[in-house]
Structures are given as structure tokens and as C-alpha cells.
Amino acid sequence: MKAHSLIRASLRRATVGAALSCACAVPTVCLAGPPTADTTSADDNSRLRALFREGVQAFEQGRNEQAVRILSEAWAIRQTYDVAASLAQAEIQLKRYRDAAEHLEFGLSHFAPVESEQTLEQMRAAFADVKTHVATLKFKVNRAAAEIQIDGRTLGASALTAPQFVDAGVHTVQASSNGENASVVISVEAGNEYPVELRFKASTAPDAAHASTGGDASDERSLVPVIVAGTVAVVGTAGLVGFSLAASSDAETLAHLKDKNGTSGCADGTASPADCSAQLDAAQSHDKHRNLAVASAVVGAVAVVAIPIYWFWPRDRHTAEAARSSSFRVRGAVGVGHISVFGEF
């Protein structure tokens, strides 16, 4: 941890000293780092200077928990490279390597140009050492502005440019956007770097060219109604043929019995009762089969006509999406004789 001690000494000389000397001239804290005093009130600047000095003193006295607490208060007022570096040193002593890595990464990314090259190299060395205790994650998300979390801890919105650090072990990574979630579970080892890809499902909305031209209506429609209608058409055709043959057979039987019984044989009692009963049954069967043949023809014809109407009839995209996404379903059955076809639309 020699590099960490050197950082402490260097920052203490360059930062705290600068802050105290500057305080005599102006009411703002002159911590080394990005000039953000215009966004911080004079009272906050004064408190920031006091907290920084108190936190560094607590660290040098070995009171690391107190140093982290005090410096975290300073960090909440204004995030600067020197506060980040000081926080990291106390966190390293407490073996909070993930937090230390995050603060050192920030410190290096926002390092003040006026600082010495020696201090910069010392921070880089400390950062390289800390990274051996954590895993580094780099994110790729297929949707912009998605909120990213690790184990419930919010990191920010995609695309995250800075690497993220986690302790070794198993972690759940999740991205959230517009009520949708994409998540992965990863197992990582310290000292390694891992790419993490979070993919949301592709949008179902058609592209602008497709929407402007109306697109091909058939590619938005389910095949289920077509299959059901086709089945109904086949059943209707089969019923037409079958019942027509049955009606024809009944007609032959009826004609034979009429010839046998005579025109008025059943009325005046000259024909046998059995033949008269058979003639009546044949007449009723003929009427029944003829009616069923007609019904089969109508059902089959309607199904055949319905298929091209359903498939090619234009409809707007919103109606099609509503039809596909609707949870309402209509179940129906088309029956011809003793044959029934069930469908769901």
C-alpha cells in the first residue's frame, strides 16, 4: 500500500494546502479539480473545505470508518478528483475495493492538469492494484436511456461509458426501459474484465416505409383462421358429396316403393302396411339428406369465400396489432350432420 500513502501525502500537500491558502483570499474552497464553485454556495464551500480537512486528518489517525463517513459528506456536496482519491485510500484500508475502484476511476478521469505527474502515476498504480480485487464490467445495451442496475443498485442509464466494478461472485444485472426488463446473471472472478450484453426484445412496430405503404397485409395475419376455414370447406364439400349420394339412393328406393305400392295403394289399403311404412321412411330420409347436402354446400362455399376476404381485405396496422394482442377469444363450432369443426379466433 506504499502507493496509497504517497497519494495521501501528495494530495494533502497539493490539495489541503491549496484550499487553506486560498481560503484567506476568497470565500470558496479551492480544492484541486474541475472549477465547479459557481454551482456551490459559499456555505457549502466552507463546509466542504472543513470536511475534507477533517476527513484527511481522520484517515491519517487510522480512523478509517470515520474518514469514509466524513469524506462521503464532502463527496455529496461536490465530486472532485481529490475527494475521490482520499475516499479511495480509506476504503482500501477497509477492504472496500469496489468503492475504492469507483472513486479512483473517477479521480483519474477528472484529474486536475495542475497536479504533478508523480501524483497521477501514484493514483494509477493504486488503481491497478485495487482492480486485482474486483471484477470489471463493461456494458452493451441495445436500447438507449435504459436504467441499469446490479443487484438492485442503480448504476445509471445506457450507454454507460465508464467501467463498473463488482466484487467476485454471482450478480444479477438488469436493464429497464418503458416497462420492459432485460436481465442476465453473471459469475465473475476478481482481476478479470467481463463484457455484459443486455438485449431487449426487438420492437414489433413496422418501419416507416412499411407503415407508409401499408405493407403486405398477409404478413400481419394469423394462419389459424385460414386453416379452420379450409377445414370447414373440406368438410362442407365432403358433406355435399356424401349427403347427395344418400339422397340419390333414397330417391331410387322411394321410386321403387311408389311403383310397387301404386299411386293410391297406401291410401286405399291395397298395399301392405310394411311397404307403406318403408315408403314413408324413404321419403323422409330423402328430404333429410337433400337438406343436409344443401347446408353442406352453403357452409363450404362460405368458408371458401371467407379465406381470400380475410387474407386480402385491407386493414390498418393498429387494428391488426389490436387483433393479435387482444386477450379476447371467440370459440365457435361449425357442424354438418354428425361432423363438427371447432375453431378459436
Image (tube, grey):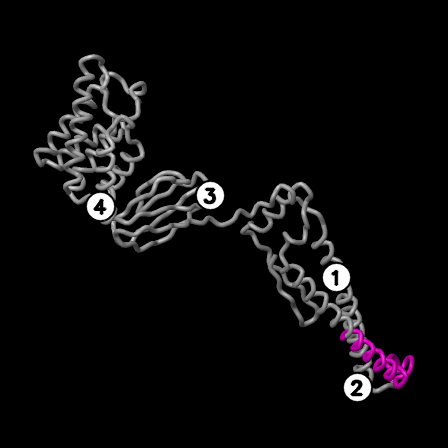
Location of the C terminus by quadrant is bottom right
Q: How far apart are marks 3 and 1 (CA)?
A: 45 Å
Which of the two residues, 314 or 303, is positioned nearer the viewer here? 314
Residue position marked by numbered label 4 in the rendering: 129
Q: Which residue is drawn at 60% across and 59% down?
A: 344
Residue drawn where x is 36% and y is 38% of the image: 156
Q: Which amino acid does label 4 sit on?
A: Asp
The three-letter code of the residue at mark 3 reads Arg
Q: Where is residue 340 in the image (x, y as percent from the top left)?
A: 65, 68
Q: How many residues crowd mark 1 within 10 Å: few (<14), some (14–19), many (20+)?
A: some
- Indicate which disc, 2 or 3, sits on the residue closer to the N terminus: 3
At numbered mark 1, what does the secondary structure look like: helix, strand or loop?
helix
Could you tell me residue 74's position as x and y percent? 21, 28
Q: Which of marks 3 and 1 is in front?
A: 3
Residue plotted at (17% across, 45% down) = 95
Residue corresponding to mark 1: 304
Tell me where the magenta segment starts and ends, as one range: 242-269
Per the rendering, the mark at residue 249 is none
Q: Is mark 3 on a helix, strand or loop?
A: loop
Proximity of marks 2 and 4: CB atoms separated by less than 8 Å: no
| Numbered mark located on residue 274 in the image | 2
Camera-side residue: 228 or 315? 315
Q: Name the residue under label 3.
A: 143
Q: Earlier in the sequence, mark 3 or mark 1?
A: 3
Graded by Cα atoms within 10 Å as few (under 14), some (14 to 19) or many (20 or more), the crowding at tag 2 reads: few
- Asked whether 250 falls inside the magenta stretch, the response is yes
Dividing the picture into quadrants, the one containing residue 83 is top left
